[in-house]
Image: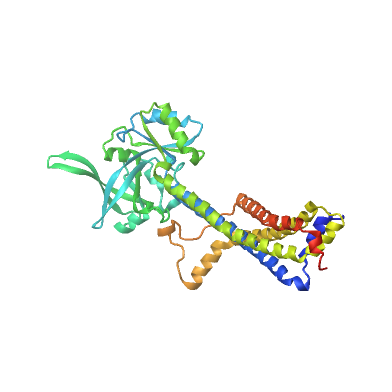
């Protein structure tokens, strides 16, 4: 198959003669720059996607999508409310809970904690609590009256207790006795210890007991604190919360995860966008090199361009020659950069772990980055967007040299030939 003349000449001009080796070198630098920019951009976006996925998994292993409670932190006739909530087509699970502040004491140590009363079967549909257990069994909280408690690993470590140990739980609720007023407390047997990574500090602040035991401990009677609700799409949690609030005519306080963590999650998205724009500057620099190389090539080929014009080639056909050359340089850079970016994104976690092991350093700390490793999640939509933007920038950079070539004056170009 014969190529169109413009494409044939554009390909031929890529093979520089000896006397135009410098132009060829700049073209190579342009290819390298575009490849480097595409590779870095794909890798950076993959790392941000990895952080996003890791933090989302860690956060929503303990944080419900939507919470419904009374304005006095009490929910009466909660079974009827739970049935109505479960009928919402966007809701996938409903779990009752009792929550309250507490002071845990053991071995002479005291640790403040947020105590949750739960139904294990229901809570497992919303939180990843069973899979987070380091020791013990969540089923120990199935029946009331056994007074079992599941502690975070941080709390258990500070109290110096293990599964089978005893922890005294004190609450702000008061009991009136013949000896006077005293805080409510109860001895609980440690039934399990969970660990949910270090980023959000759940291990140091949460503990779980049976729902009925918690209601008695906080003197709620047959009431509970509220309902934890899981929805199909966590990013639609706000609209689901609003629809539930409207359904109950505003009689209950309905909030979603974005109230507490939305700003944090939005910050991650802004950082990803800003890093994307900054990394585009690398491709822009490579495009500037492409402009330089094509301008010098046009100056070198002025006589040949003039001859082609005398043979009948139109200015648009001349432009196509150099547009083709610039597009090919850009395309080669994109293909090389995409391949390198995919390979690096798929192996960046292992590479960083290897560097940490080799130099005995901790580059990623959960206390700062919420995870203690460098995550990566490759997205083909990111690859497509990066490649398309890089190609458009390459074509834009090619346009001026190609237009300048089409404006070559035949008589002036051939005067000294």
Residue 376 visible at all: no
For the image, the number of numbered tags is 0
In the depicted view, which residue is nearer to us: 375 or 306?
Answer: 306
Relative depth, front residue between 19 and 361? 19
Residue 58 place in picture, x, y as percent: 45, 51
Tell whether 320 sits left or right of 344.
right
56 left or right, relative to 75: right
From what the image shows, is residue 43 above or below residue 177? below
* Quadrant of the drawing holding the C terminus: bottom right
Residue 95 point in image, percent of width and height: 41, 37
Q: Quadrant of residue 143?
A: top left
Q: Which of 401 and 104 is in front in this view?
A: 401
- Indicate the quadrant where residue 259 lies: top left
**Colouring style:** rainbow
- Residue 373 lies, in percent from the top left, at 48, 61
User: The N terminus is located in which quarter?
Assistant: bottom right
**Is any part of residue 98 visible from this angle?**
yes
Q: Work out whether 121 lies above or below 13.
A: above
Q: Is residue 147 above or below residue 44?
A: above
Who's the residue at 28% across and 35% down the image? 220
Q: Is residue 289 left or right of residue 147?
A: right
Which residue is painted at 78% across and 67% down in the image? 15
Drawn side of residue 417 relative to residue 181, left or right: right
Pick whichever, 325 or 370, lies toward us.
325
Residue 151, given in percent of the width and then of the height, sits at 35, 51
């Amino acid at each position: 198959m014969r190529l169109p003349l413009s494409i044939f000449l554009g390909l031929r001009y890529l093979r520089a003669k000896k006397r135009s080796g410098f132009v060829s070198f700049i073209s190579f630098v342009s290819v390298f720059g575009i490849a480097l920019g595409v590779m870095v951009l794909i890798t950076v976006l993959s790392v941000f996607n990895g952080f996003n996925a890791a933090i989302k998994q860690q956060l929503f292993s303990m944080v419900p999508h939507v919470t419904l409670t009374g304005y006095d932190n009490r929910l009466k006739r909660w079974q009827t409310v739970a049935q109505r909530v479960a009928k919402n087509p966007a809701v996938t699970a409903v779990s009752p809970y009792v929550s309250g502040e507490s002071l845990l004491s053991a071995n002479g140590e005291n640790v403040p904690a947020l105590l949750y009363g739960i139904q294990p079967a229901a809570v497992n549909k919303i939180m990843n609590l069973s899979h987070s257990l380091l020791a013990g069994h969540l089923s120990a909280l199935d029946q009331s009256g056994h007074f079992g408690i599941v502690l975070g690993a941080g709390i258990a470590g500070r109290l110096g207790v293990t599964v089978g140990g005893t922890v005294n739980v004190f609450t702000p609720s008061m009991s009136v006795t013949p000896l006077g007023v005293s805080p409510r407390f109860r001895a609980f047997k440690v039934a399990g210890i969970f660990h949910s990574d270090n980023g959000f500090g759940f291990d140091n602040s949460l503990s779980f007991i049976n729902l009925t035991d918690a209601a008695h401990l906080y003197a709620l009677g047959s009431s509970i604190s509220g309902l934890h609700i899981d929805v199909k799409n966590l990013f639609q949690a706000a609209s689901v919360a609003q629809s539930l609030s409207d359904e109950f005519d505003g009689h209950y306080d309905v909030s979603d995860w974005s109230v507490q963590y939305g700003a944090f999650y939005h910050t991650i998205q802004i950082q990803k966008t800003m890093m994307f724009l900054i990394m585009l500057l690398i491709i822009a620099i490579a495009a500037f090199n492409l402009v330089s190389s094509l301008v010098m090539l046009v100056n070198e080929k002025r006589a040949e361009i003039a001859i082609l014009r005398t043979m009948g080639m139109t200015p648009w056909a001349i432009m196509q020659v150099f547009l083709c050359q610039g597009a090919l340089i850009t395309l080669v850079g994109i293909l090389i950069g995409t391949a390198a970016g995919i390979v690096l994104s798929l192996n960046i976690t292992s590479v960083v772990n290897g560097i940490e092991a080799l130099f005995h350093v901790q580059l990623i700390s959960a206390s700062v980055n919420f995870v203690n490793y460098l995550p990566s999640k490759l997205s083909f939509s990111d690859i497509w967007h990066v490649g398309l933007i890089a190609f458009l920038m390459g074509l834009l950079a090619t346009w001026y040299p190609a237009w300048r070539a089409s404006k070559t004056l035949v008589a002036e170009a051939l005067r000294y030939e």
